[in-house]
Image (cartoon, rainbow, N blue to C red):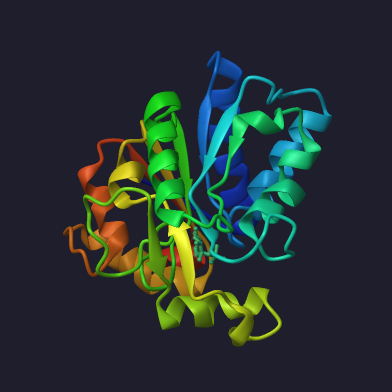
Amino acid sequence: MDVVIVKNYIEMSKHTAGMVGDLIKHQEKPILGLATGGTPIGMYQLLVRQYREGLLSFKHVRSFNLDEYIGLDPTHAKSYHRYMNEHLFLHVDMPFHQTYVPDGMAKNLDKVCRSYEKLLKKIGPPDLQILGIGENGHIGFNEPGSDFNGHTHVIRLADSTREANARYFQSIDEVPTHAITMGIKSILRSKKIVLMASGEKKAAAVKRLLEGSPDEDFPASALCRHPNVTLVADEAAFGQN
Ligand code: GLP
């Protein structure tokens, strides 16, 4: 795993936006794997700025999002679909039909998972997958104990994840209990993976990741099995490593 240590959140956002921008500029029909959460917001802002300045076009970009809460419709303030609209999709020239986010409102969730996985195989895999990391080591919503051979599936969120994500909701009771997430195997099919980490809350997870032994109790450790992963961490997340 390549490790890039940068000073702070802004530098992490710039570095990662640079990697995404390079791909978009140099590849004819790039496929992006996109993440949500607080970590990539600065990166999306920079990409939108580059688009506005005429430095980037998303016309030929296709994207797959990692995950979505179950029970929140795309217009819900805290759904990942709405997050993507607000932070990227509505502000750039990427046609909506080229963006894929799992449907957390579908009646038949297993079918949604199967179709998403099929689509990922047909159109994908992503040339570049952006990841954040949960304090408990989750990637996407693959919680500790997730199968490293898992495909897109429904997952019950760990209590610690609901607690960590309660900051985005009015109260923890509003945080959905389940989500759809790309599986670890689906994520590992990406050609290149960039894991972003910022802030001291992520330091323990980054430390364990860099210890480098695959362990299903720590989902991010599956990344050790991928030949092309870059960790972009700020000093606070890198901690005492
Ligand atoms: C969330 C998302 C992940 C994200 C992670 C970290 O629950 N499902 O995709 O990377 O947890 O979130 P944040 O960046 O807000 O710390």
Q: Is residue 183 above or below residue 142?
A: above
Q: Quadrant of the C terminus?
A: bottom left
Question: 38 left or right of 31?
Answer: right
Residue 241 visible to an observer of this rendering:
no
Residue 56 visible to an observer of this rendering:
yes
Q: Position of residue 104 (x, y in %)?
A: 55, 57
Q: Choose top left, top right, bottom left or bottom right for residue 54.
A: top right
- From the viewer's side, name the closer residue of 146 and 192: 146
Q: Residue at x 53, y 33 (%)?
A: 19
Q: Residue at x 36, y 64 (%)?
A: 206
Number of numbered callouts drawn: 0
Q: Quadrant of the N terminus?
A: top left
Q: Position of residue 210 (x, y in %)?
A: 27, 59
Residue lying at the far front in this picture: please name it: 107
Q: Residue at x 23, y 49 (%)?
A: 224
Q: Is residue 121 above or below residue 175?
A: above
Residue lying at the far right in this picture: please name it: 52
Q: Position of residue 235 (x, y in %)?
A: 49, 62
Q: Is residue 231 above or below residue 179?
A: above
Q: Position of residue 174 (x, y in %)?
A: 63, 80
Q: Residue at x 58, y 61 (%)?
A: 37
